[in-house]
Amino acid sequence: MTTGTETIRPPHDTVWDFPGIAARAARTDEEGRMPPQNWTEIVESGYLRLFHPEEVGGTGASAATQAAALEALARACPGTYWTATVSALLCAKLVFTYGDTERHGDLIRSLVEGRRLAAFAVVETTAGSDASTFRTTVRPADAPGGGFYISGEKSRISNAPVADVAVTLARREKPPGDDGPDWCLAFVDLRQPGVRRYDIPHMGLRGMPWGGIVFTDAHVPAADVVPVPFGELAEGMAWGWLKTSFSAIAIAESALDASVRHAKERVSFGRPLAHMEGVQAQLAESRAQIDAARLLARRALHERVAGRSARDLIAKLKIYATEMAVGVVVRAVQIHGAAGVTRGHEVERLYRDAEMNVIGGFTSNRLREQVAESTGLGPAVYAEFDWVAPAGLGRDPSGLDGP
Ligand SMILES: Cc1cc2nc3c(=O)[nH]c(=O)nc-3n(C[C@H](O)[C@H](O)[C@H](O)COP(=O)(O)OP(=O)(O)OC[C@H]3O[C@@H](n4cnc5c(N)ncnc54)[C@H](O)[C@@H]3O)c2cc1C
């Protein structure tokens, strides 16, 4: 944009770079915790504010700016990226979408200003893909001031061990005559006596705290329990699929970058690896796949920022980008030979990080069912499973923890 001879830079037209976070990435992985300086660097960069309008403390950046910032932070340290982006993008969007900017404006502002950290607590210790097994419930509280109590256990939740607040999926214990939705999102203060947290050691994204939350009659103010029809939740959760896709693309780009450097430096049979046809084909394959995923991701983010759903596109993107990154990282490890499987090597870390994205925030298999449904195949239908048939377990599992 120009006026006369002066060039006016649009807001946020900046090169996103997190050098301190990148320099600490190996140590972050080794120690399995995010250094406090990472959070300071993120808050000061304005990253957390990019995704939201000014009315809730955001800066309302363009899709192009958001994409550049997402990829830059995930390049610097994928675990740190997850922590920050689950909170400021996914959780804040969920509160913004299903909550109320008047009642929940302060909560959103605290997340985008980095004063509080949020977790999105959906999955339980039972089969995470199957919401019918979830038991966490809110019920009206007999406490002074009313509100609700929440009880249940959420497990394998990003940020759970350290978060200040959890956007929690729960069942509603409904009084007679209440024909509202069976499910709700509860915005639960995690710094209260009815909440216990635990860590779960994990393979990759090790800068991100991960673990469980046990609610035992934790109190939730009435305004912070928002009934939501279950079928509508995927719309908000798609922000998480998009976030995870950018993480995968960044991991793949880092792995390719390391592969190209190594291929130029490592000499074998009298020439650099980079001059061998087989290695070139592997690198070219990675290049093409990353570029394809990035185009899809930018398109999807552009649609969302323009206020359109793009849910199907994001479901396809999450499958493609996360599985693509695993393939790229496997090739990177191959190109590095034994160095690539040596503890502490960059591609060894990326290899562990990449697989986490395929599972985290809805597995590829479950998303494939959604894509199939939107292709006109109808919903996946599961017939009653015959446990006692020879093709089943051959025995009745009652008495076990459950099927
Ligand atoms: C990095 C990471 C971060 C996470 N963060 C969060 C978070 O912040 N909040 C949260 O609530 N959860 C989080 N999770 C949990 C995650 O959402 C679950 O792990 C995931 O939904 C799968 O549930 P599960 O692990 O219990 O696997 P299961 O549901 O037991 O599934 C096991 C396997 O069976 C496959 N499968 C299941 N059903 C079907 C089907 N119908 N058809 C075909 N295959 C099927 C799955 O795809 C998977 O491969 C995170 C997980 C990871 C790895």
Image (cartoon, helix red, strand yellow):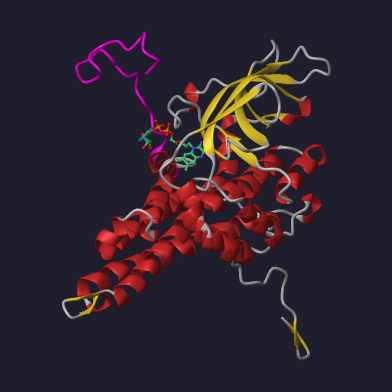
Residue drawn at x 41%, y 36% is 378
Is residue 19 in sight in this rendering?
Answer: yes
Residue drawn at x 51%, y 23% is 134
Q: Farthest residue to the left: give it.
A: 269
Residue drawn at x 65%, y 40% is 118
User: Residue 12, percent across and down?
Assistant: 69, 68
Q: Report the quarter where the C terminus lies.
A: top left
On the rendered structure, is 385 left or right of 106? left
Residue 73, compared with residue 106, is above or below; it is below
Q: Report the quarter where the N terminus lies.
A: bottom right
Is residue 205 in sight in this rendering?
Answer: no
Tell which of 258 and 323 is nearer to you. Answer: 258
On the rendered structure, is 111 left or right of 281? right
Tell which of 293 and 333 is nearer to you. Answer: 333
Image-quarter location of ligand 1: top left
User: Residue 235, percent across and down?
Assistant: 58, 42
User: Residue 219, percent across and down?
Assistant: 72, 22
Q: Is residue 378 magenta?
A: yes
On the rendered structure, is 305 left or right of 336? right
Residue range (magenta)? 374-403
Q: Is residue 297 magenta?
A: no
Residue drawn at x 53%, y 58% is 24
Question: Magenta span: helix, strand or loop, mainly?
Answer: loop
Tell which of 45 and 94 is nearer to you. Answer: 45
**In which quarter of the view is residue 233 placed?**
top right
Residue 187, compared with residue 339, is above or below; it is above
**In which quarter of the view is residue 162 placed?**
top right
